[in-house]
Amino acid sequence: MAKVYILPKEAKSFIQYLTTKKKPVAENTALAYIQDLSYLFEFVKASPLTITEEQIEEYLNQSPSCSTFCRRRSTYSKFFWWMRVKAKLRFDDPIENIEIPEKDDSVTLKHLTVEQMSSIKQVAINDNISHNRLRNIAIASTLMGCLLRESELRKLNLEDIDFEMGVMYIKKSKRDKSRKFPIPDSVLADIKNYIENERKSHPHALFTRHGGITAMLMGGKSIAYVSRLAGHSNPAITLKYFGLIDKDLIDNRMELF
């Protein structure tokens, strides 16, 4: 059952104005206005004729985010503009002195604990089935030890690591900034182990992409099957993944099409 929104008669008239004017607002926009106004007057329990700046600000401060605060304030600004200019029901604007809070750039990030990160790496270490076991260990180790973003990890190339100096270079990451930092010995050891014993031939990428596709091709699945599964529009795209597979590992009996 759809939620029923209760509005004061002035707010109902405002919604009617928005939906019947020469350029009416979209249905979803009207619904957003209805919701914002309904929640305000449900919280404050005051008439649009007498509601005060302090009461509106108290409700706005309950907003879960800056964007919600701004959207609600915009709704109420339009409503009280209509109350003053069109309906002439008020002479003051209880919104004008309510300031928009500064956007907080310090976003609270959900993160894994040290114990959780260690558990993830341990899962990779204990995995004796995957063809990419050493790669997965190196990925977990690099993310934990070098504090990389997921996008940075994906863009990491072999030449971005100075093995002699034990330094990693991150090129033009967040806000177009580059940086370099020392790699912990344990991380460097995991990366070297992966490169020397498991990494497939690839001109640039440190952690070769699309391990699932190459694993299926190595396992004998047909290119036509893998192409459909991967959503490739042309089997020729899937053929490119043969470049990531050591020729000695390709099953000569593989059905191509």
Image (tube, helix red, strand yellow):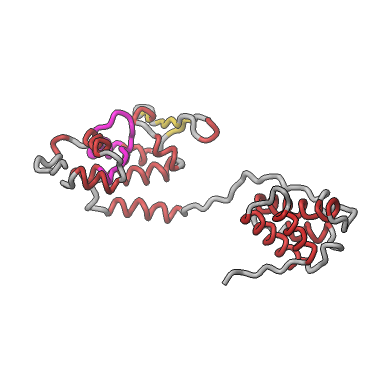
In the picture, which quadrant includes the N terminus? bottom right
What is the x, y in percent for residue 85?
Answer: 85, 51
Q: Position of residue 65 (x, y in %)?
A: 65, 53
Q: Nearer the viewer, residue 17 or 56?
A: 17
On the image, the x and y values in percent for residue 168 come to 41, 32
Image coords of residue 80 (percent x, y) = 81, 54
Spot the residue most to the right.
91
How many numbered dots are placed on residues in this image?
A: 0
Residue at the image position 81 percent from the left and 51 percent from the top: 81
Q: Is residue 76 left or right of residue 236?
A: right
Query: Is residue 24 shown above or below 6?
Result: above
Residue drawn at x 9%, y 43% as measured from the top left: 253
Asked whether residue 129 is drawn in magenta, I would say no
Q: Residue furthest bottom?
A: 1
Residue at 77% over, 67% down = 8
Instruction: Tell whether 175 sits left or right of 98.
Output: left
On the question of residue 43 being in view, the answer is: no
For the question of whether residue 206 can be seen, the reply is: yes
Quarter assignment of residue 49:
bottom right
Where, quadrant-wise, is the C terminus in this rendering?
Answer: top left
Q: In the drawing, does residue 199 fall left or right of residue 61?
A: left
Magenta-tinted stretch: 192-213
